C-alpha cells in the first residue's frame, strides 16, 4: 500500500494516496487489505469512492456533540 503514497504526510498534514494508480501492485494491495472477496470490478468501484487525502494526525480539539447545538430536518407535511 505504500506504493500508493504520493506525498510526504509531514509536509502536507494529510496522507495522500493515489487510489487509481496504474500500478497493479497498488490494485492488488487494496484488494487484499480492504476487499478480498470483491471482484476486480467491485474493487474498481470501491476505488472510485475513496478520497485521496486522509488526516495524518489524530485531532486533539474537543469534538463532542451537544444536544442544544444539533440541527433538525423537518419531516414531511
Image (tube, grey):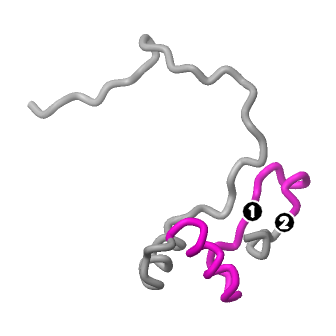
Position above or below: 12 against 66? below
* Quarter of the picture holding the N terminus: bottom right
Residue 15 is inside the magenta segment: yes
Instruction: Judge by depth and name the residue closer to the eye, 26 or 51.
Output: 26
Q: Residue at x 68, y 82 (%)?
A: 21
Residue 9 is inside the magenta segment: yes
Image mark for residue 16: 1
User: Is 77 positioned to the left or the right of 53 in the image?
Assistant: left
Residue 77 image-quadrant placement: top left
Region rendered in magenta: 8-35
Q: Residue at x 72, y 48 (%)?
A: 55
For mark 2, does the 10 Å Cα neighbourhood hold few (<14), some (14 to 19), or many (20 or more) residues? some
Residue 53 at what x, y percent from top left?
Answer: 69, 58
For mark 1, does the 10 Å Cα neighbourhood hold few (<14), some (14 to 19), or many (20 or more) residues? some
Position above or below: 21 against 12? below
Q: Mark 1 falls on what kind of element? A: strand
Image mark for residue 7: 2
Q: Residue at x 72, y 24 (%)?
A: 61
Residue 34 at what x, y percent from top left?
Answer: 55, 66
Residue 72 at what x, y percent from top left?
Answer: 32, 25
Is the C-beta separation of discs 2 and 1 under 8 Å? yes
Q: Mark 2 falls on what kind of element? A: loop
In three-dimensional space, the C-alpha distance between marks 2 and 1, rounded to whole angstroms, equals 6 Å
Amino acid at each position: 500500500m505504500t506504493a500508493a503514497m504520493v506525498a510526504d504526510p509531514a509536509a502536507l498534514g494529510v496522507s495522500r494516496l493515489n487510489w487509481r494508480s496504474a500500478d497493479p501492485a497498488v490494485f492488488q494491495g487494496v484488494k487484499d487489505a480492504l476487499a478480498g472477496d470483491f471482484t476486480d470490478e467491485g474493487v474498481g468501484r470501491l476505488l472510485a469512492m475513496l478520497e485521496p487525502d486522509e488526516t495524518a494526525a489524530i485531532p486533539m480539539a474537543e469534538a463532542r456533540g451537544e444536544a442544544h447545538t444539533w440541527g433538525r430536518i423537518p419531516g414531511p407535511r
